[in-house]
Image (cartoon, helix red, strand yellow):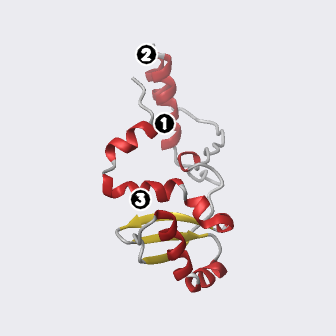
């Protein structure tokens, strides 16, 4: 049973939080051309926290705080926001849920002892064999060769 988030949000949010949903939904429209330099990070009570991508913009935005507050409140129709704080953030280039990179593994030769080889012969499950070989490979510590 699939439930769409846009259908679920109105049920979860109370009437007093409707302005917050409106703020989130219309953020880019409210800030206009600044949308390429900032993002809405958090709404807490009567304060919003804005993430700024470049440090030199933080001072400019701080000086424009009252203008930003007025713009937000004008859009919302009531003076919900009384404070703005700024913090330096990295600009996201991809969705939050997809920001990790796959690790690259270096293939290395795994040397097994005769005892380990004999133990592997008794195991019939292919996946278990491979998992055990990988485990033993990770446990191997390179020792310096004797006499070298």
Which residue is depicted at the point 50% across and 17% down? 126
Q: Nearer the viewer, residue 14 or 90?
A: 14
- The residue at 53%/46% (across/down) is 97
Q: Neighbour class for label 1 at 10 Å: few (<14), some, many (≥20)? A: some
* Circles 1, 2 touching at the beta carbon (< 8 Å): no
Q: Label 2 vs label 3: CA separation?
A: 66 Å
Q: Is residue 5 left or right of residue 141?
A: left
Residue 10: which quarter of the image? top left
49 or 111: which is nearer to us?
Answer: 49
- Residue name at image x 64 percent, y 39 percent: 108
Give the residue at mark 3.
Answer: 19
Residue 120, given in percent of the width and then of the height, sits at 47, 21
Residue 49 position within the rendered picture, expressed as x and y whole percent measured from the top left: 47, 70
Please give the residue where the numbered disc 1 appears in the rendered image: 136
Q: Which one is in front in this view, the residue at disc 3 or the one at disc 1? A: 3
Q: Earlier in the sequence, mark 3 or mark 1?
A: 3
Q: Measured from the top left, where is residue 60 in percent x and y?
A: 63, 83
Query: Judging from the image, what secondary structure is the residue with disc 3 in?
Result: helix
Quick one: label 1 or label 2, which is nearer the N terminus?
2
Image depth: mark 2 or mark 3 in front? 3
Marks 3/1: CA distance?
Answer: 57 Å
Front one among 122 and 2: 2
Residue under pointer 2:
122
Determine whether the residue tagged by mark 1 lies in a helix, strand or loop: helix
Residue 25, numbered label: none
């Amino acid at each position: 049973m699939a439930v769409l988030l846009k259908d679920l949000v109105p049920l979860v949010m109370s009437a007093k939080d409707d302005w917050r949903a409106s703020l989130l939904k219309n953020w880019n429209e409210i800030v206009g051309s600044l949308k390429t330099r900032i993002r809405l990070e958090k709404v807490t009570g009567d304060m919003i926290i804005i993430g700024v991508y470049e440090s030199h913009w933080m001072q400019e935005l701080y000086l424009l705080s009252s203008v930003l507050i007025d713009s937000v409140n004008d859009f919302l129709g009531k003076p919900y926001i009384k404070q703005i704080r700024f913090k330096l953030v990295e600009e996201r280039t991809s969705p939050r849920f997809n920001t990790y990179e796959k690790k690259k593994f270096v293939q290395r030769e795994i040397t097994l002892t005769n005892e380990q080889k004999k133990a592997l012969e008794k195991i019939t499950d292919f996946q278990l064999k491979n998992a055990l070989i990988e485990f033993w490979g990770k446990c191997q510590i390179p020792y310096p060769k004797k006499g070298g």
